[in-house]
Structures are given as C-alpha cells and as structure tokens.
Amino acid sequence: MPSPKHVPVVIVGAGPAGLLLGQLLYQAGIDNIILEQRSPDYVLGRIRAGVLEQVSMDLLREAGAGANMDRHGLHHHGIELLFAGQRHRIDLHGLTGGKYVMVYGQTEVTRDLMQVRAEEGLATVYEAAHVQPRDYDGEQPRVRWEKDGELHEVRCDFIAGCDGFHGACRASIAPERIRHYEKVYPFGWLGLMSDTPPVSKELIYVNSERGFALCSQRSLTRSRYYLQVPLSDKVEDWSDEAFWEELRRRLDPEARERLVTGASIEKSIAPLRSFVCEPMRFGRMFLAGDAAHIVPPTGAKGLNLAASDVGYLSRAFIDYFKNKSTHGIDHYSEQCLKRVWKAERFSWWMTSLMHNFPEEGAFHTRVQEAELDYLVHSRAASTSLAENYVGLPMA
C-alpha cells in the first residue's frame, strides 16, 4: 500500500492497546495508521490475560468493539483464595457496591478490535520492519519503516508507542531522558490451556506449601491453569500428565475431585517482573501499555493498565484536535503514572502474598499466613483487595 504523506497519529504496535487507541480515535474522527512488526496470526497467537476491569469494558464499548465481549464474556462477582487447605471467597460485587470483572480472553479482545478496524477499512501495516520514530521532540515527527523491501515514511502530529516491552519507541529514547524501575521475581508461571470445563465458576488463587497455583478460565469450556515453577524449568520438562498431577497436589480435596483434565492446546512458561519507566511522554511521542510498564499477572492488571493508558491518551488527542487544548497531552504522563503505580503496588502485593519465597525463610511464610488469615476475616482488608481487583476508577 502507498504510504500517506501525513497522518495525525501514528500508532506503533497492533496489540490491544494500539488497536483500541486507533478505534477510539477513529470514532472521534481522527485519522491514524497502525504499524506492527509481526503478522496478524502472530499477534493473535499471543496467549495473555483474560480478566477485564469495568474501565476496560467501557472503553471497548466506546470503541464499538464490545458486542462479542458482552455476548460471550463471563461476569465474575468474586474470587477465591485457597490457603492452609481451605478456600475463602472474596465477594467483589458486594464489597465494591456492585462492581464485577469480566472473563474474556485477550486474544478475543484483539480479534474483535482487528475486525472492527478491518470493517472500517482503516490503515494497518503488518510486518513493518525496522520501525524508527524520528524527530518527536520537534513539531513534525516522522516514522520510518520497511515493508517488502521498500522504505516508507509518514509525517504526523503525534506518535503513540504501543509496541510492547521490546518495542522500537522506548528503545529510541536517549538513556539519560528516562528512568527505569524494575523488580524481577525468582520464579515463573507455567501455564496450560485446555478445552476442559473450569474447576470452579470463579478464579481460585492458591497459596500452598508446594507453590502458587491459579485456576482460571476463558469460557465455560476452556480452562487456563498456572503453576509457580523455578526459572530454571523448561516447558519440555513438563508433560501434560506431570502438570495435572502437580496442580492436584496444590488444590483442596473438593477442587481435586472436580478437576477435569485433558490435552493441552497451549503450554508456556512466563517469567514475572514489575517494571515502570518514567516519564511516559517524550515531546510528541507517548508510551502506553507494556512499552511503559509491566506487572506480574497475579493482580490481573496488565491489559487493564494498557486500556486505561489508551483511555487517557485518546482523551488527550481528542481534546487537542477538537479544542486546540494541550492540557491532556501535557498531563498524560503524570495522570497515567498515578494509576500505574497503584496497580504496580497491588500486583506486587498479590504476588508477595500468594507465592512461595524459599529464600525469605520461615518468618516470611508465617507472615504470609497471618496476613491471609487477617485478609479473609477483616471486611476492611477484603474491601481493599476487592476495590483494587475490580479496578480503580480513571480520574
């Protein structure tokens, strides 16, 4: 396709953050182009999060991409914490004045956004190689890329870096202009997906002597399970049978009895890290989603943080193009980072609470036990967990 000479917004990255931003801008009449270094099949092949906060649901509906979510997503009004061999339910709905989360996979979110963008005939360039954001400190940023051996370039008013942790946008920033905060955890999550009914109607977070486990789901017939494993483990070390046997050992007797096993349709190990870069704006380039921050998946915040970044950024761009106001873009980084750090805190806390940390010793284990006992028997503590889990409101 021929490259346009000028587009108001160039979005780098066609994951859910970039696609959602593109659709929100389109709904407001703001033209944009999306550049993605991978193929559509590769993007859809990323198996990621599946729990949506109210903010994310509202933004998908605003973008015109919420119909399938509303038709097929599962409303969850609570979660269960399993520790010391017993399960305890956290009533998200009752503790937050009626809020809930939606179980709807990131793959489905991405597919829905791709579909509505394709239906509108909007410009998306897949397999765009060597993407280079340029001149974003000036008045006329440019983005250059290669496609099928040809060099392309487009001028724009703004660049949105939605291209993930290893993307070109953050990598283009001079090191002295950016500050990184990072914590790497000493374990990973071994995940298995299977076409089997979930073991429970709601997610079960497990703290056991053998390590953390999570019983999650994507639908009434597709389950997603996770086990805490050492970073030294490899996927090929784990047969399906070994996975199911270890999961059983970490569950309570009732869950063991109800567990339906089957062949895996996807299996992978993901390391856990907490990461934030500051600021999130550099001249006329703005970072969003995994390009700016990573959370461990324990708190179900990764996709939701990306969505709220995009919510702030779309408002800022719309205010600029419609009202000639720079207020939103001037305060984008500060506004996002307030919410980001609260989500980072919650995800770190959930990770610290539910996982085994052998190097911390017996004192840490006993403190975990005391905190879990306090959490499930204190309405105030349960409310704090519930408020953060369903998602804090956007300012």
Image (cartoon, helix red, strand yellow):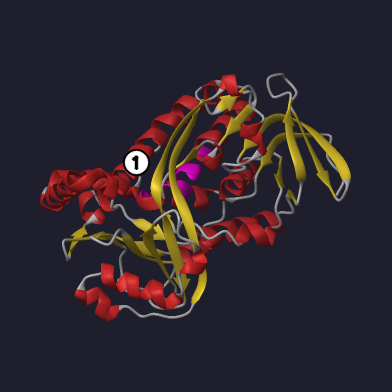
Q: Which residue is mark 1?
A: 392
- Residue 20 x/y as whole percent: 58, 47
- What secondary structure is the stretch in magenta mostly built from? helix
Marks counted in the figure total: 1
Determine the secondary structure under disc 1.
loop
Find the magenta span and give its range: 299-310
Say which amino acid is labelled 1: Leu
Task: Look at 32% across and 48% down and name the residue there.
Answer: 351
Q: Is residue 267 visible?
A: no
Residue 210 lies, in percent from the top left, at 27, 62
Q: Nearer the viewer, residue 78 or 356?
A: 356
Residue 196 is one of the magenta-drawn residues: no
Residue occupying the point 46% across, 70% down: 193
Q: Camera-side residue: 38 or 124?
A: 38
Question: Which quadrant of the figure has residue 341?
Answer: top left
Question: Badge 1 local density, few (<14 within 10 Å), some, or many (20+)?
Answer: some
Quadrant in the picture for residue 141: top right
Residue beneath the point at 40% across and 30% down: 338
x and y percentages locating residue 35 in the rendered image: 72, 45
Q: Viewed as shown, does residue 42 lie left or right of 245?
A: right
